[in-house]
Image: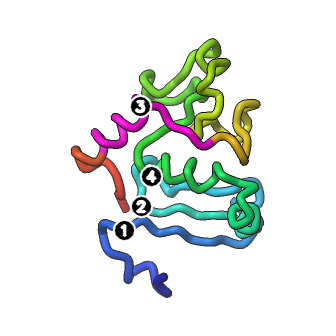
Amino acid sequence: MISNENLRLSNELLLNIKDNTGYMKMLYGKANKIGGGNVDLNESVVQNIISNADNNTIIHEFGHTLGLLHVNDTYQTDPQQYWTVKKQHTKDSTNAMFSGDSRYMHDKTSKTITRQQLDLIIQNYRFGKINLM
């Protein structure tokens, strides 16, 4: 735990607990950017995370910091990470990277990633595309 963001080391991820106000009012959590080094977590979901009622939010936001995009967003720029509607209906409907407005995203069960997503995370690590400030 640090009291000042400037104390964070360059290879560390910063998890901020934010008040349920402003832009956070509509969000469970938010990564500062794809491949970024900061995650803001809405204080209103912390108790659900602690009690195991929310197994998705932290995994989902950390996924963004590791370079993963929403699998169901048609506007995203990486076609390898976008899933067709047919694939969204498969066993992978427990994937952690569905957007919050997807009917397949569930706080309790959306916690898996695919082998392809894991390979992308490894590739992002090797090429220095993660933990960007």
Mark 3 crowdedness (10 Å alpha carbons): few <14, some 14-19, many ≥20: few
Q: Which of labels 2 and 3 is toward the front?
A: 3
Q: Amino acid at mark 2?
A: Gly
Q: Quote the CA–CA distance across marks 1 and 2.
A: 7 Å
Q: Kindly indicate whether the residue at mark 1 contacts the one at mark 3 (C-beta within 8 angstroms).
A: no
Return the residue found at the far top: 86
Q: Quote the CA–CA distance across marks 4 and 1.
A: 11 Å
Q: What residue is rendered at 64% in x and 16% in y?
A: 85
Q: Amino acid at mark 4?
A: Thr
Query: Which dot marks residue 12?
Result: 1
Q: Amino acid at mark 1?
A: Glu
Q: Quadrant of residue 120?
A: top left
Taking 125 as reference, is 48 above or below it?
below
Question: Which quadrant of the figure contains the C terminus?
Answer: bottom left
Which of the two labelled residues, at mark 3 and mark 1, occupies the earlier sequence position?
Answer: 1
Decide whether residue 118 is among the magenta residues: yes
Q: Which of labels 4 and 3 is toward the front?
A: 3
Q: Main secondary structure of the magenta part?
A: helix
Start and end of the magenta stretch? 111-124
Mark 4, residue position: 65
Q: Quote the CA–CA distance across marks 3 and 1.
A: 24 Å
Which of the two labelled residues, at mark 4 and mark 3, occupies the earlier sequence position?
Answer: 4
> In terms of secondary structure, where does tag 4 sit?
helix
Q: What residue is rendered at 65% in x and 28% in y?
A: 93
